[in-house]
Image: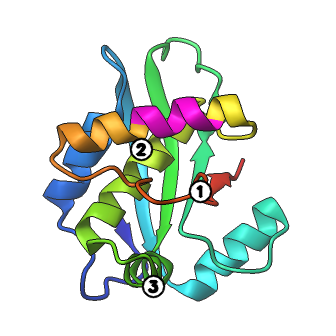
Amino acid sequence: MQYAVKPRGVPAKKLLRRWVAAALEAGVDASVTLRVVDEAEGRALNNDYRGKDYATNVLSFAFNDGEPMPGMEGMVMGDVVLCAPVVAREAEEQGKDLEAHWAHLVVHGMLHLQAYDHEDEVEAEAMEALETAILQGLGYPDPYAGEKGPIESEPAA
């Protein structure tokens, strides 16, 4: 865990670790850094890696472009960056429980590290179904109930 900022409402490390573990496929281990940032850092990263000049909710950076490192097969490696002010604002605007929204974005970011994506409708539907199942297994509601499409975030690198 890395905290560039730790505003009120950021979940405890124990919860964050639980969500990371829940998002890992069976038999997969991980070496992942979760970094919580402010809007300035979130915007800079989104601009540098995606060419979009605004802070987004979550960015995923898979090590080695998602390819297994020699001797590290079956290991998910990378960084998930969560922009605390964006997460809080989205939860409020969408009428979602803040903890449930954090859980969703951690799971979403972890799935990106495992090569899941939402570039087309088929991929998006599969990823959303998996996110929903994981979150419901953790006791959270369907994050897409009442929404038209996937969350905006993307893998960054």
The vertical placement of 11 against 86, above or below, is above
Q: Secondary structure at mark 2?
A: strand
Q: How far apart, in angstroms, are the residues tagged by discs 1 and 2?
A: 30 Å
Circle 1: residue type: Lys
| Rendered image: mark on residue 77 | none
Q: Count neighbours of disc 2 (C-alpha within 10 A) and say few if under 14, some if 14 to 19, many if 20 or more.
A: some
Classify 10 Å Cα crowding around label 1: few (below 14), some (14-19), many (20 and above): few
Residue shown at 42%/52% (left/top)?
33
The picture quadrant where one finds residue 63 is top right
Q: Specify whether residue 49 is painted magenta.
A: no
Instruction: Identify the element where label 1 is drawn.
Output: loop
Q: Quadrant of residue 123?
A: top right
The CA distance from mark 2 to mark 3 is: 25 Å
Residue 134 to residue 100: above or below: above
Q: Amino acid at mark 3?
A: Arg
Dot placed on the residue nearer the N-terminal end, 1 or 2 = 2
Residue 7 coordinates in the image, percent (x, y): 31, 88
Which one is closest to the eye, mark 1 or mark 2? 1
Quarter-wise, where is residue 88 in the image? bottom left
Instruction: State which mark lies toward you, 2 or 3.
Output: 3
Q: Amino acid at mark 2?
A: Val
The earlier-in-sequence mark between 2 and 3 is 2
- Percent across and percent down for residue 15 are 17, 56
Q: Which residue is mark 3?
A: 89
Cα distance, mark 1 to mark 3?
19 Å
Q: Describe residue 66's horizontal placement relative to residue 106 as left or right.
A: right
Under tag 3, what secondary structure?
helix
- The residue under label 1 is 148
Q: Identify whether 71 is placed above or below 32.
A: above
From this viewpoint, is residue 1 visible?
no
- Magenta segment range? 124-130
Q: Which residue is mark 2?
A: 32
